[in-house]
Amino acid sequence: MSFEEMVVAIIGTIAGVGFLGFVIAKVTGLIKAWINRNNNSIPEEQFNRLAKAFMQHKKESERRIKNLEAALGTKKSDHDESSKKSSKQIEAPRQEIEIEDRDLEEEESKNKNDNNLRNMLRE
């Protein structure tokens, strides 16, 4: 074997080993992707942020609904006393109205990233 043939053989062997490594890496990647095909792609931190924003939104919505029910209950009782007597009610309307301090709530919500849910939905 001549010198040139030995150099070509060595270079070919090195190239073959490199190509074989590349093929093994790609096959390993495909196997990992196949194994993880059913896993969620949402990172835990993002999921926790979304859950926190959802819970905050739920609490605010429930509070608003209670305020509206209380306000409608008092207005309804003033206007429809005669219709109340004729119709049976399961529950009496609430006579208490919750007083809100909007300035404090706005400052707290700004500090707690008030638009978390909107920002995450836009992403």
Image: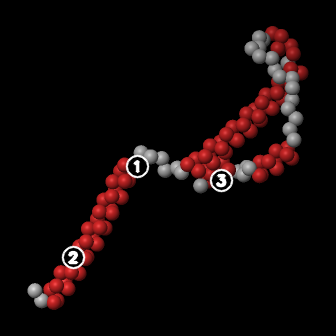
Q: Residue 59: image x %, image y %?
A: 72, 37
Q: Residue 97: image x %, image y %?
A: 86, 29
Vertical arrangement, residue 11 with respect to residue 72, above or below: below
Give the Cα separation between the discs numbered 1 and 3: 28 Å
Give the Cα separation between the discs numbered 3 and 2: 54 Å
Tell me the residue that label 1 is attached to. 36
Any part of residue 108 in sight: yes
Tell me the residue that label 2 is attached to. 13
Q: Report the label total.
A: 3
Q: Give amino acid for label 1.
A: Asn
Q: Residue 110: image x %, image y %?
A: 77, 51
Direction from residue 52 to residue 33 in the image, left or right: left
Tell which residue pokes out farthest to the right in this image.
Answer: 78
Q: Residue 106: image x %, image y %?
A: 81, 48
Tell me the residue that label 3 is attached to. 119
Q: Residues within 10 Å of mark 1 (few under 14, many from 20)?
A: few
Between tags 1 and 3, which lies in front?
1
Quadrant where the C terminus sits is bottom right
Q: Kindly indicate whether the residue at mark 2 contacts the one at mark 3 (C-beta within 8 angstroms).
A: no
Between tags 1 and 2, which lies in front?
2
Residue at x 54% of width, y 51% of height: 43
Residue at x 52% of width, y 50% of height: 42
Q: Secondary structure at mark 2?
A: helix
Q: Secondary structure at mark 3?
A: helix
Q: Residues within 10 Å of mark 2 (few under 14, many from 20)?
A: few
Q: Give amino acid for label 3.
A: Asn
Nearest to the observer: residue 97 or residue 48: 48
Query: Who comes first in sequence, dot 1 or dot 3?
Result: 1
Residue at x 81% of width, y 32% of height: 67
Residue at x 79% of width, y 28% of height: 69
Q: Secondary structure at mark 1?
A: loop
